[in-house]
Image: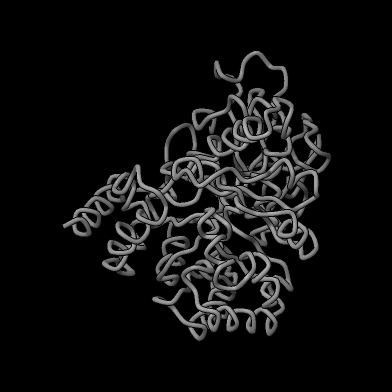
Amino acid sequence: MIRFYNGRVLSFKNGTEITDDEVWVDGSKIVYVGKNFDKKADREINLNGNLLMPSFKNAHTHSAMTFARSLADDLPLQPWLYDMIFPMEAKLTGEDIYHLSKLAFLEYLTSGISACFDMYYFPEDMARASVDFGFRTVMTCGLNNFKESIEKLEEYYNTFNNYNELISYRLGFHAEYTTSRALLEGVSALAQKYKTPVFMHSSETESEVKECIERYGKTPTALFDELGLFNYGGGAYHSVWVNDNDLEIYKKQGVYAVINAGSNSKLASGIAPVSKMIDKGIKLAVGTDGPSSNNALDMFREMYLIAATQKLNDKDAASTDANKILKMATVGSAKCMGLDNCDSIDEGKTADLIVLDLNRPNMQPINNITKNIVYSGSKENVKLTMINGRILYENGEFVGVDTEEIYRNAQKITDRIKG
C-alpha cells in the first residue's frame, strides 16, 4: 500500500478545488482519500506541498510513428501523408510496432500521460508492448481502402476487449477520404451490432471537407451521421473545419471533438473552434496526434496551444478558460477513451496518478495552480507518473525500463525504413 501525504490534491470531484487530503493506493486502486487513515503503508511518499492529480490521457495518437519524427517535416498534410508517410509505413512489421511504441511510452510518462488512444496497425504487437511495459492503451483501427477489413475490425474488437486490464479497443477507421462508402457502411453495421461508438479523423483540413461535399453533397460529419456511425456516440479527431450543423450533430449524438492543436498548427491545417464547442456544450478531449506530425508527445504544449490559438482565433484574451482545457486533457480524454474509472481521484477509482512539482521556478509563486499548469507548466514539473497503481517514472528516472535498449531498437528500425 502506498500513502501520498503532506501535499495538495486535485481530484476533479469538485471542479478544480484543491485539498490537503491524503491519498492511499492499494494494488491498482485508490482505497482512501481523506485524513487519518488507520492503516500501515508499505511506502510513504511525502509530497512536500506538491500536487497529486489524475494523469493526462492522450485521446489521439499514432504511437509507433516515432520512426518518422522529423523525417517529413515542413510539408502540408496531403504530401506529408501520401508522399512520405504511407511509403515508409508499408515497410513496418509487427515487431517494429512493438519496439517503436515503447519509445512513445517513455515520452508519454515524462509528460504525465498514463494512457493513449492509439490508431495504428498490428494491434497485437501494440497490445503486447503495452502490457510488457505496463502502459495503458485504448486501440482503434486505421481501416481504409488499402489496409485492414471489416472482418479484421470485428476480430480486433472482440479480441482486445478481452485481453488484459491495460488494453481496450474501440471501433474506428482512418478517414472519409481514404475509406469507401462500402467500408463506412460496414463499420456502421458493427456499431449497431455492438451498440458502441466509432472514432475517426474528420474535418482536419479545408480541402478534405470540400472534397467530401463534392463526393457526397455533405460534410464528413453529416455523412457519418447519415450512415449511423454516430448512433452510439464516438469521436472525431481534429474537428477543425466544422460548421454549425456539424456541431449540432456532435451535440445531439454525444460525439467527442478530440483537439490536436500542435499537429494542426504544424501542418497549417487550421484552428478548431474550441470556444464555440465549449459554449455549445460539446464533449471535448485532447490528443497530441502522432510523433511524426506534431512532433512532440507533450500534453503541456497541447494545452497551452489550445489556449493560445483560441485567443488568437477569437481575438479575445478572455476566450477559453484554462481550467476547462485542463479538464479536457484529464477527465474529458478519459471519458472519450472509455476510461471512466481513471477520470478522478476517489475511492474505488483506478490509480492512474501524477505528481507535479510545484517547487520549480515556473510554478512559483503560488497563485492559481490549475491555470498555471496550462500556461506555465511543462514536463519538468512531472515528478511521478503512476499507472494502474505502479510507479513507472519518478524523479526523472524510468522505473524498471532499459531505455538504452529502446533507443537502439528504434534507431535500427528507422535506419532500415529510410534505407
Q: Which residue lies furthest to the left in this view?
A: 419
Quadrant of image for the C terminus: bottom left
Q: Which residue is drawn at 79% across and 31% down?
A: 19
Q: Is residue 160 above or below residue 303?
A: below
Counting from the top left corner in percent of width and height, residue 304 is at 58, 32
Q: Is residue 382 above or below residue 250?
A: above
Query: Which of the 4 image quadrants contains residue 168?
Result: bottom right
Q: In this view, does 203 lie above or below 299?
A: below
Q: Which residue is drawn at 69% across and 50% down?
A: 284
Counting from the top left corner in percent of width and height, residue 349 is at 72, 53
In the image, taking residue 37 as reference, residue 125 lies left or right, namely left
Q: Which residue lies furthest to the top in this view?
A: 365
In the image, taking residue 125 as reference, residue 298 lies left or right, namely right
Give 332 or 274, whichever is nearer the viewer: 274
Q: Which residue is drawn at 65% across and 51% down?
A: 333
Say if residue 9 shows up in the picture. Answer: no
Q: Which residue lies furthest to the right in this view?
A: 14
In the image, taking residue 149 as reference, residue 181 lies left or right, namely right
Give 351 or 196, whichever is nearer the viewer: 196
Counting from the top left corner in percent of width and height, residue 191 is at 66, 78
Q: Which residue is drawn at 55% across and 58% down?
A: 117
In the image, taking residue 191 as reference, residue 132 lies left or right, namely left
Query: Which of the 4 image quadrants contains residue 237?
Result: bottom right
Counting from the top left corner in percent of width and height, residue 202 is at 57, 60
Give 56 or 384, whichever is nearer the viewer: 56
